[in-house]
Amino acid sequence: MDKTEFYKLLIQRYKDKTATDEEIEVFFQLIREGTLSAPLMDEMGIDLGDIGEKEQHVRHRRPYYIAAAAMLLIGLGVAYLLMDRSATPSTESSYSSTSTDVPAGGSHATLTLPDGSRIALDDAAIGAVVQEGGVRIAKTEDGQLVYQVAPSVSAGTDQGIAPALHEISTPRGGQYQVVLPDGSRVWLNADSRLRFPPVFASSDREVFLEGEGFFAVAHSNQPFIVHTEGQQIAVLGTEFNVRAHPEEPTVQTTLLRGSVRVDLGNGQASYVLKPDQQSVVDRQAQTARIEAVTASEYAAWKDGYFTFRNTPLATVMQDVARWYDVTIDADSLPDKRLYAVLPRDVSLATLLEMIGLTSGVKFELTERRVSLE
């Protein structure tokens, strides 16, 4: 058996979960060395030459795509990470715990109605949650919240009446999906909130976001407008991701399909995005820049993955803190950057092992606080 056949067999045995402990050890050692780069890419049907042409602007692009391929192949376990190529992989565990592990976040949210009443959607039964004024709000079997509006219902804003807004909010450690009255779908990431009327006006469809959300907007002649602090986004029908956490200095809008217009809050600038473009708005300076990106990476969270591309470790750990609802001792984090594709459904201990696999960074989990050893 030549080396190529051996590598393919090793990958297949790992995928099939039939590899021995010794073969698993060899598998990860070959990933660290980069020896499995070509076989992994071949398995995924990815051409390394194409990657080079499309991603020349990204440093260390090749290991990043190896990470993505490995994660998609493996499905479970450990993705290949790259923080510093010069870092020596630690042979010791990169994680230690003095308490029980922390589970991954899940589908958790609260619906707040205009009268102030709150409904914990985790505990709500499948079926109608609220039904009044021709609007039926129901929880589906797969955990979505769906707004259904009777055709006879007219919008209050058309009659000069300020809309009474509903709010869906997710805690740290939670995410949720809602189908809005017009059929648009919104995925809310952890520690986020979306406010919207139960019936949209005939002139436009306005919603208000704090935190992070992915929007799949139903096509209509009515503009769909997303308000965040410092900007608003106007579309007719499209898919895009918005990251607007109030504690972060920038607001990111990333377009997957269609077209969106980003208007700054000062009313002095507008930007039209094309697919695979991202606007980054500086909240304080009220300025924006447009960057070319792989847009799907910024929406991977809704499909169960963390995706990091040359991301500062401090930012990585912010996302970890929100999803696992833990505290991170950020002041002690080293100035490193991470390339990784990691699953969001594993426990915190497993994720910390993944992050530390090749970086040499060792974490300690005490109660719900993560620090460096």
Image: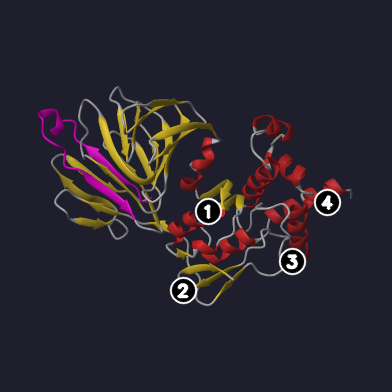
Quick one: label 1, few (<14), some, or many (20+) residues within 10 Å?
some
* Disc 2: which residue: 367
Instruction: Give the amino acid type for the residue marked by disc 4 in the picture.
Output: Phe
Viewer-closest of 321 and 30: 321
* Disc 3: which residue: 21
Residue at disc 3, secondary structure:
helix
* Disc 1: which residue: 316
Instruction: Give the amino acid type for the residue marked by disc 2 in the picture.
Output: Glu
Say the numbered circle drawn on residue 6.
4
Nearer-N-terminus badge (2/1): 1
The image's colouring method is secondary structure
The span shown in magenta is 142-170
Res. 153 in view: no
Circle 4 or circle 2, nearest the eye = 2
Instruction: Give the amino acid type for the residue marked by disc 3 in the picture.
Output: Asp
What distance separates the C-alpha of mark 2 from that of mark 1?
20 Å
Any magenta on residue 150?
yes
Q: Is residue 285 above or below residue 21?
A: above
x%, y% of residue 18?
71, 60
Please report contact status of discs 3 and 2: CB closer than 8 Å, yes or no.
no
Nearer-N-terminus badge (3/2): 3
What distance separates the C-alpha of mark 4 from that of mark 2?
44 Å
What distance separates the C-alpha of mark 3 from that of mark 4?
16 Å
Viewer-closest of 97 and 345: 97
Nearer-N-terminus badge (4/2): 4
Circle 1 or circle 3, nearest the eye = 1
